[in-house]
Amino acid sequence: MSVLAGGDGLTSNLELLRRVRAIEPDAEIWWRPHPDVDAGHRNGAVLDDDALKYADRIVRGGGMAALLDVVDAVHVLTSLTGFEALMRGREVICHGTPFYAGWGQTRDLAAVPDRRGRKLSLDQLIAGVLILYPRYLDPITGLPCPPEVLVARMAQNRIVNRQGWIGPLRRFQGRIMARLRTYARKNAAHI
């Protein structure tokens, strides 16, 4: 839904790759498939052979922080990765309208809502996104709390995962969905 609602007409990751290559013909482009797409939890998979028509490399595994430390810029549709890249001082090119676009910190290729008409500093944007706008729940008590309590809980390693069964179930579901999509792609070619 994020891509459909905020993708400015782009409806697939392959379209994004094509557009990035057209805009950056001489760049070394690294394609990072969304981990949930790779795991089969979301639609939007791009076959590696198709991705490599536009990207120089496909990067899987590991966290985004290490990858963001070695790139010059990030192209996104609506991905949270763009916000992470901004916090690391990287240039962010938005092909869609994620929540952090239109505030003067990104290169916006899509039309942004008029309500985002003023420029914010990076510190102002981060404060709005992480402190002023969200409502947090204390992971210990389950009660509303300020962000400082949540940070203290993380620093004390006191985050309680009350739904530990979800991780293994989601991995199992992802494997089944990936196999079903592979089966459907193979059989669609024979119809």
Image (cartoon, rainbow, N blue to C red):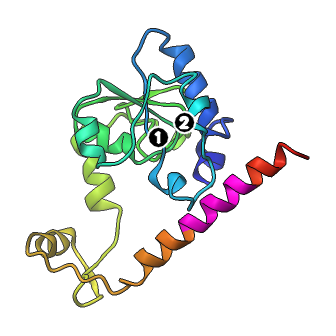
Visible residue check, residue 71: yes
Does the magenta segment cover residue 62? Answer: no
Dividing the picture into quadrants, the one containing residue 178 is bottom right
Q: Is residue 58 left or right of residue 23?
A: left
- In front of the other: 88 or 64: 64
| Labelled pair 2, 1 in contact (Cβ < 8 Å) | yes
Q: Is residue 26 above or below residue 35?
A: above
Residue that carries the numbered disc 1 in the rendered image: 116
x 69%, y 61%: residue: 180
Quadrant hosting residue 105: top left
Residue occupying the point 68% across, 53% down: 182
Which three-letter amino acid code belongs to the residue tagged 2? Answer: Val
Query: Which is nearer the eye, 15 or 148?
Result: 15
Q: Residue furthest top?
A: 26
Number of residues whose C-alpha sits closer than 10 Å to that of mark 1, classed few (under 14), some (14–19) or many (20 or more) = some
Q: Secondary structure at mark 1?
A: helix
* Residue sitting at x 15%, y 68%: 151
Q: Which image quadrant for residue 83?
A: top left
Give the CA distance from mark 2 to mark 1. 7 Å
- 187 vs 110, left or right, is right
Asked if the magenta segment contains residue 182, the reply would be yes
Name the secondary structure under disc 2: loop
What secondary structure prevails in the magenta region?
helix
Whether 169 is drawn above or below 191: the answer is below
Residue occupying image coordinates x 63% and y 36%: 8
- State the extent of the magenta-drawn residues as a range: 174-183
Circle 2 sits on which residue? 112
